[in-house]
Image (spheres, rainbow, N blue to C red):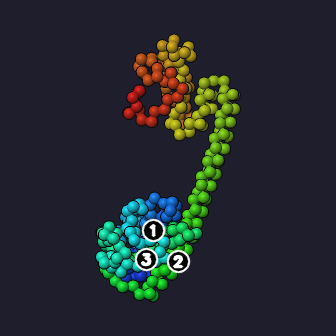
Amino acid sequence: ATTYQETLEAVARVFPECQGVYLNLWQHFDYERADYVEIVAAASASTQLDESIIGSRFAKTELPFSAESPDDRIVVIENVATDPCLDAIARASYEARGTRAYIRVPFFRDKRLVGAIFFQYASPRSFNESEHRLAMAVGDLVMTAVERIRLLQEAAAAAEVQRTTLLAEQESREELSLLYKTSEALNAASTFPEIISAIAPLAYRADKVNLILWEHLDYRDASYFEVVAGVDQFGAETKVVGNRYAPELYPIAVHMAGLRQLAIENIDEHPLV
């Protein structure tokens, strides 16, 4: 098994009379540091479980431990309704979940409570010593699987971080190379079209790139702005090159003149358009 769910499905086949087998793990794999416990897997060989319960988290205050100690090696409750180890709150909590009897086998690592495997039964029943030993043995095997799967998950997460870092470094190198080439092209440019052609690769996702200049190169004294150069995504000159526009026809132009940069993601919703 390479997942918690696969592990639980294998366990459920060993306990065909069990209505549900649940794998619960504490946050940080440590009961003392945790705020909640999570149901990371659930399976049953006899009934159809509600899969939505997988991923559910419960705060410590919600758990009906009551007189049970989370440090017990095994907890066996043969009748939720009558067992003296359960108080009224714990009894009501279990009964609300359809639990009438159960076995809980906690997991420990370096004396820290990591989680537990919970065997749920819908009717009161007696458990013999053989069933106790089997549950504890299975619990030990599941704990081993949990450790192995956790290490696999951590290794996969580390590999993903490394892959993401390498991709970011590669993209950074590509961007630096592109900027260097653009800088060379701009230094060599002697016309407006050459300037646009130099920077167009930086805007490869844009449909069009246009260079707009105010009359007299000063919007304060200008009566128009002109599209002096432009290319589309195919490298062809845009049709608006050479066109001049009066600023009063485009009120946004004045706002653009006073900004270092303006990005509009939706012209239908932007207040300046």
Q: Residue 35: where, in percent of width, then height?
A: 46, 58
Q: Nearer the viewer, residue 126 or 196?
A: 126
> What amino acid is found at the position of numbered circle 3 in the picture?
Val
| In this view, 263 is above or below 257 | below
Total number of numbered labels?
3
Q: Are marks 1 and 2 in contact (CB under 8 Å)?
A: no
* Labelled disc at residue 24: 1
Sequence order check, earlier mark of 1 and 2: 1
**Residue that appears at 54% across and 67% down:** 112
What is the secondary structure assignment of the residue under circle 1? strand
Q: Residues within 10 Å of mark 2 (few under 14, many from 20)?
A: some
Q: Nearer the viewer, residue 20 or 52?
A: 20
| In this view, 32 is above or below 225 | below
Residue with the mark numbered 3: 75
**Residue that appears at 39% across and 29% down:** 271
Sequence order check, earlier mark of 3 and 1: 1
Q: Residue 42: where, in percent of width, then height?
A: 41, 71
What is the secondary structure assignment of the residue under circle 3? strand
Residue 2 appears in the rendering:
no
Per the model, the C-alpha gap separating discs 1 and 2 is: 14 Å
> What amino acid is found at the position of numbered circle 1 in the picture?
Asn
Per the model, the C-alpha gap separating discs 3 and 1 is: 15 Å
* Labelled disc at residue 140: 2
Q: Are marks 3 and 1 in contact (CB under 8 Å)?
A: no
**Residue that appears at 62% across and 51% down:** 165
